[in-house]
Image (cartoon, helix red, strand yellow):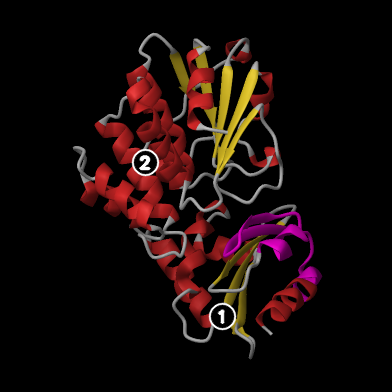
Amino acid sequence: MTTSNILEKIKQYNTIIIHRHVRPDPDAYGSQNGLAEILKASFPDKTIYVVGEEEASLDFLATMDDIDDHTYKNALVIVCDTANQERISDQRYLQGKELIKIDHHPVVDAYGDIQWVEENASSVSEMIYQFYLEQKNNGLQMTDRAALLLYSGIVADTGRFLYPSTSERTFQYASDLVAYDFDRSAIYEEMYKTNLNIARLKGYILQNIEVSPTGVSHVKLTKETLGKFNVTSTETSAVVGVLGNIEGIQIWVIFVEEDDVIRVRMRSKGPFINEVAANYEGGGHPLASGAKIYKWETIDPLLAELEALCK
């Protein structure tokens, strides 16, 4: 698969609808909306939509379009940053005529008529900028707003360029993007601001973590605890990294209780954890994955598998 195949397919359609994953992060928003802005600038006669549930914390980046089912007729659908179909936000994506998948997660669900997957890419936002670079001589145009969105996605998914996925190419693309006209300071301020409830929850996590001799740590956030701090399950994504800088921790897990499931947020400094996540209805990157369990008793066998990795 080459980016030229994707561009050729885009040129064939008048209506293009871009999706991304549920519980979106800045890379999901950045890649989805960055691509939309590039296509709007490049093909002003086409109709481009972005869809999915709104995430209030990311309104500073973009808001979603509200479209009816009929819009999908004879439309091209592109899904960004989503490894498996279950996690695509707005399940109407199947109503389009053709489907393109653009992703950087390990392949667990080979969906789509065209699939472009680069596991070594730091983010899908990085891939969208690569798409632009490779096809700018064939009509693609970059804008200041597209650059803002793609830069935001890259910064977030690389942990401000600290994660191992950050490559020489990542830095080069970021360097290119900051040459466009947007306020980087404002983006950082919005992306990394912390409200008081989240700050207090971080303190609770630091006071209640359990750490094993091999370096596996975990903390449980029950519905009662979340209620006490007035934090939603979705908002707990902001606390996942709080344990990452503690000496001696190799793998850390935050269990988040919801009404009918317990979300498992897993991170690692070295051992690959995505295969363990796959054993519990999850998956993701080798060092950053998610999973689901349905009762607290399942914690022990899951942690035992992570212990085995550290040993």
Question: Which residue: 80% across, 74% down?
Answer: 301
Q: Position of residue 4 (x, y in %)?
A: 48, 26
Question: Which residue: 63% across, 37% down?
Answer: 88
Note whether 35 is above or below 58 in the view shown. above
Residue range (magenta)? 274-300
Please tell me in which quadrant of the rendered image residue 267 appears: bottom right
- Residue 73 inside the magenta-drawn segment: no
**Label 2: how many residues lie within 10 Å, few (<14), some (14-19) or many (20+)?**
many
**Label 1: how many residues lie within 10 Å, few (<14), some (14-19) or many (20+)?**
few
Residue 45: mark? none
Distance of label 2 from label 1 (alpha carbons): 36 Å
Q: Nearer the viewer, residue 46 or 239?
A: 46
Helix, strand or loop at mark 2: helix
Image quarter in which the C terminus is found:
bottom right
Q: Position of residue 269 (x, y in %)?
A: 53, 73
Residue 150: mark? 2
Q: Looking at the image, is mark 2 or mark 1 nearer the viewer?
A: 2
- Discs 2, 1 touching: Cβ within 8 Å: no
Question: Which residue: 66% across, 81% down?
Answer: 310
| Residue 272 shows in the view | yes
Q: Which residue is mark 1?
A: 208
Number of numbered discs: 2
Residue type, numbered disc 2: Leu
Q: Nearer the viewer, residue 115 or 44?
A: 115
Note whether 53 is above or below 250 in the view shown. above
Helix, strand or loop at mark 1: helix
Q: Position of residue 236 (x, y in %)?
A: 53, 59
Question: Which residue: 42% across, 27% down?
Answer: 36
Name the residue at the bottom extreme. 213
Image quarter in which the N terminus is found:
top right
Residue type, numbered disc 1: Asn
First in residue order: circle 2 vs circle 1? 2
